[in-house]
Amino acid sequence: MHEALLFLHGWVRWFVLLFGLLTLLRPEPRLGAFFAHTLTLQVVLGVVLAFTSPLFQGALANLPAVMAAGGEARYFVAEHWVGGLVALGLAHAGLAQARKGKPRARLLFGLALLVLLLSIPWFRPLFRL
C-alpha cells in the first residue's frame, strides 16, 4: 500500500503544479478550483502516506534526534508537510478571492505555487513507475 500511495503522491504532484501554473497565468475560479482541490487531494494522500511510511514512522519514534540531526528524515517530518499545508491554505484563499473577482487571487495562487516549489523533494525521483 505504501508504494501505491507513494506512486500516486508523486504523480499527482505534476497535476498540482500544472494547475498552479495555469491558475497563476489566468486566476479564474474554475482553474483555481482545479488547483485548490487537486492540492487538497495531494495533501490527503500525503497524510495517509505519512501513516504508512517506514521513514516517517521511524523518524517520529526518534523525533528529538531526527530534529537535531537534520537531513532527509527531518525534511519529511518538519518542512515537507508544513509547506504543503501552508500552500493548501493559500490556494483555497486564492480560490475564495477568485470567486469574488478580486485581483489578489493571483498573488495568493502565486504564493501557494512558490511554497509548493520550495516544499517538493526535488532530490527524490521525479517519476515513479
Image: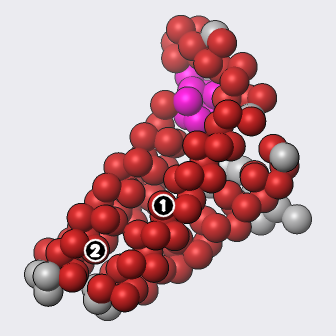
The quarter holding residue 24 reads bottom left
Q: Which mark is residue 101?
A: none
The residue where tag 2 is placed is 95
Q: Would you say residue 53 sits in the magenta stretch?
A: no
Q: How many marks?
A: 2
Q: Furthest-right residue in view?
A: 129
Three-letter code for the amino acid on which mark 2 is drawn = Leu
The residue where tag 1 is placed is 40
How crowded is the residue under tag 2: few (<14 C-alpha within 10 Å), some, or many (20+)?
A: many
Q: Residue at x 59, y 9 (%)?
A: 65
- In this view, 98 is above or below 47: below
Of 48 and 61, nearer the camera is 48
How crowded is the residue under tag 1: few (<14 C-alpha within 10 Å), some, or many (20+)?
A: many
Q: Residue at x 56, y 59 (%)?
A: 42
Q: Position of residue 69 (x, y in %)?
A: 58, 15
The answer to whether residue 88 is seen in the rendering is yes
Position of 94 with respect to 7 (left or right) is: left
Tag 1 and tag 2, C-beta contact below 8 Å: no
Element carrying mark 1: helix
Three-letter code for the amino acid on which mark 1 is drawn = Thr
Mainly helix, strand or loop, the magenta region? helix
In the image, which residues are magenta? 70-77
The answer to whether residue 111 is seen in the rendering is no
Instruction: Name the image quarter holding the C terminus.
Output: bottom right
